Image (tube, coloured by chain):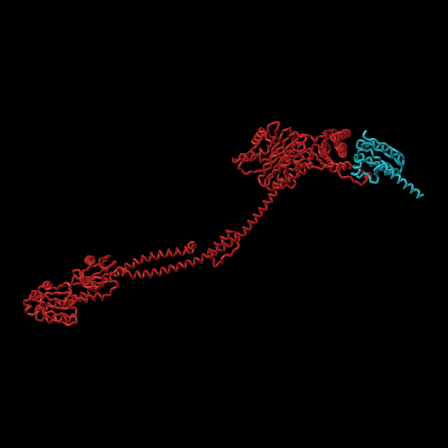
Chain colours: A red, B cyan
Amino acid sequence: MALRSIASRLALGVLTGTALVVVAGGYLLFRAMGHQILEQTHRESADLAHDAGNRIEQRLDKITDTAQMLAALVGPRPDDAPSLVHDAVQHNPDLAGLSAAYIPHSAAALAAGQSPFVSRGDDGSLTTRDLLHDPAPYWDRPWFRHGLTCTTGCWEQPFFSLSRHRKLVNYSATIMAGGQAVGVLNADVTLEWLQSVLESLKKSPGTRAFVIDQQGNYLASDDPSLVGHPVQADVLSVLRRSPADPLRLVTSQHAQITEPVWIYQSPIKGTHWLIALTVPESSIYADVRQAFLLALMVGGLALLVLTVMTFAITRRIMHPLGVLTDRAEHVARGALDFALPKVRRRDEVGRLTDAFDRMRTELAQHMAELTRVAREQQRLASELEIAQQIQTALLPGAHYLDARCKNFELHAVLKPARTVGGDLYSYFMLHDRRFYIMVGDVSDKGIPAALFMARAITLAKALAPRARSPQQLLHLLNQELCRNNDGCMFVSLLCGLLDTVTGNLALASAGHEPPVWWGQHAPRLLELDTGPALGLDEEATYPTHRIRLRPGETLLMYTDGITEATDHAMTMYGQERMLACLTRQVAEGGQDPVDTLVADVEHFAAGQYQADDITVLALRWHHDGTEREGSMLDITIGASLTDVFDTLERCDEEMLAAGVEPDVQSDVRLVLEELMVNMVEHGSGTTDDRTIELRLTAADDAITVELHHDGQPFDPLQSPAPLLTGDIADTESEGGLGIHLVRAMASDFHYAHDELGNHLQLRFIYPNRPEQDHDLQSAS
Amino acid sequence: MTFSLRADHVSPQRSTLHLHGRLDAMTFGQFDAAAADVLHQMATGSTVVLDLSLLEYISSAGLRSIARIRKAMRAREGHTLLCNPQPQVRKVFEIVKAVPVNDVFASVQELDDYLDHMQRKIVDGLGEAD
């Protein structure tokens, strides 16, 4: 946890790095200083040893000089010996005793008469005795025999004098007389001063000094207990190996040498003695080690302070970053309303804080914008959904079975590629016999197409009653759609008008795919002459193609969503596959070619995005309806009054036979008379070969009249209403009465004019029966 | 024969024309001709009664004929009264508001009562004038 923060890691890093540098540097320094210190110790200790050696040498020189001088004096003058010896002892405190021992019975001995021996007592008093009187003869003693040979003086072995209770060493010098050794001057030298010399040396703590004689025994030592004992063999061997240089002894049998020591020695001239110093290595390094330890401690303390300061400074610097980190987590949770640390200075952290603040502000704006856009999109989506519902509502049902006479059946499907689409299909019944079907495809897709589709489908339905033929419907529709069509949207439309009694089908195409027709023959394309798509050319005309559907025949209309569906290899479904599918469907005796075809297309384009709306409409002509509604009259007559009235008579007969109620019958007759007489009187113009075509059809609830006249265009609906004053005698002209009657009596009245002439459709609804709206009727 | 006209009680003061059958574009000429004969004899201020009891059907052509009779009688300061129109005829009359309601009577009896009443008024008026 603690190491997770940058401050602690930085502090730890600084600590570690600095500690490494300090330790490494300290180690090197320690090595260098240690070396210097060792050198210095070597020098100092060697000097010390040398100095001590010199001091001992000077003191010994005094003794040896005295002894040799005495020896030289008492040789020729033996009788002066006792006083000389006495004086010498008295003046030299280092002498514990001095004797001039002559060879007994020698001339010198005889001349001296005695062998004087002056010794210093414990209280410092001098006593003189004659060695010749000693009970034990000295001349047989080794010191004497050996002394006779020491013409230049010899140091003898130290020994412990029982009589004087002290350690002594003898110095012997031969007394010469007449070139012959006549005796031995023997000096007993005390060794206490040697000890005091060693003790007076300025030694560093731990340093020990000692003097050894030629036999390798301690003559003197800091440790008095060692005096007289032999020096340990390893120490001795080291001492004897190279006397000049300082030596390092690692371990020793020496009880007091338990650690590595350095040994310095210096020979004492005139003797075979050595003075040696042992300096423990640890004491050499003790100071520097202590200094180093102190430095290390100070360094460590400094490091600690540095670490704490680093930690504190970093913490202080990083603190805003920590807050920013915390705030960034806020941001991640979506909360943008928080306080930011105050910017103290314009360093990186300050800039970061500023940038963070800006980012927060912009993020908030961005999020608000995003929310707004999302809400907008949601609204659009829901609007689109509603639009889809509305668009779906514009389409009639997917299945229509002519309930009245079961003459035909219709299946349709529309699958938009998006929520809303530009494809359309529609069908509706106009009066009793005429049934419009249409399939269209608006250019483009999406909402514009959907709106244009809505416009087209609504206009088509509104204009259909005015149009006698699909050709005319397309013409009217085209003119309406061209109006204010700045977007140059257009719709291809295939429109059919079915005579639900006869199966006659008039088709007109505005740039639409050719329909498929089968029944009597295998499915094949019904190629029609087509006009341009609707909405482009106001002057466009649309040729009519008429076919007659036989029982069992089917006409299938579709949009390019079928033929242009593509599979994964971008191959189009095409008309061949469509025809093949429909052929299979026919062979298998399927009932619903629409579902089969759409399923086949979907299978073909499986896994592919549906690029275009798919619409299929199939019209099957059964012709097995019981003709409850039937044509009472369907004749074409010449435009003459006689023919007209003959026809009126026939109409009366037919209606009577069909059981049409008398009041309706007379209405129909009046209207027919008015219209046909009008056609005869006004429409014929100059030629006499005009014809009037009349079709009278009875249904359950109404009578439908169709009148076609190939005369001058005359729309009865456009003629002005007559002035009705309440008395027909008031008006000068009696014109307009007939048309007024027609308009008053017919339930529905439609007029159209095309190249074939005037077309009138009228409907007379039986009173007392509710009118049924066929257009909305669809069998589920 | 789809239309026939029978003139009854023809006098310069008051004539009754019984219309029978259909009065339409085919027959109005026949009616016009027959009616003209009667109208010639009518005096100023006289009354022509059109008995429509047996008229099954009338079209705009027939309406125009009746209008012409009414105009001719109006020129003579006379009256054209209609009696007992059948449903189809009445419907047509109503649609075009062919004649004032006062001039249409439901039955011959009602018409006669009206005419007698008018007669008395005229006589009384003359008496008072005298």
Quadrant in the rendering for residue B54: top right
Q: Quadrant of the N terminus of chain A?
A: bottom left
Quadrant in the rendering for residue A275: bottom left
Q: Quadrant of the C terminus of chain A?
A: top right
- Is A522 situated left or right of B76 in this image? left
Residue A294, position as x, y percentages in the image:
33, 61
In the foreground, A589 or A360: A589
- On the question of residue A639 being in view, the answer is no
- Is A140 situated left or right of A324 in this image? left
Above or below, B91 against A116 in this view is: above
Residue A64, position as x, y percentages in the image:
14, 66
Residue A644, position as x, y percentages in the image:
76, 30
Quadrant in the rendering for residue A62: bottom left
Outermost residue, top side: A520
Outermost residue, right side: B130
- On the question of residue A413 being in view, the answer is yes
- Is A114 situated left or right of A571 in this image? left
Q: How many numbered marks does the figure carry?
A: 0
In the foreground, A681 or A277: A277
In the foreground, A513 or B111: B111
Residue A359, position as x, y percentages in the image:
51, 53
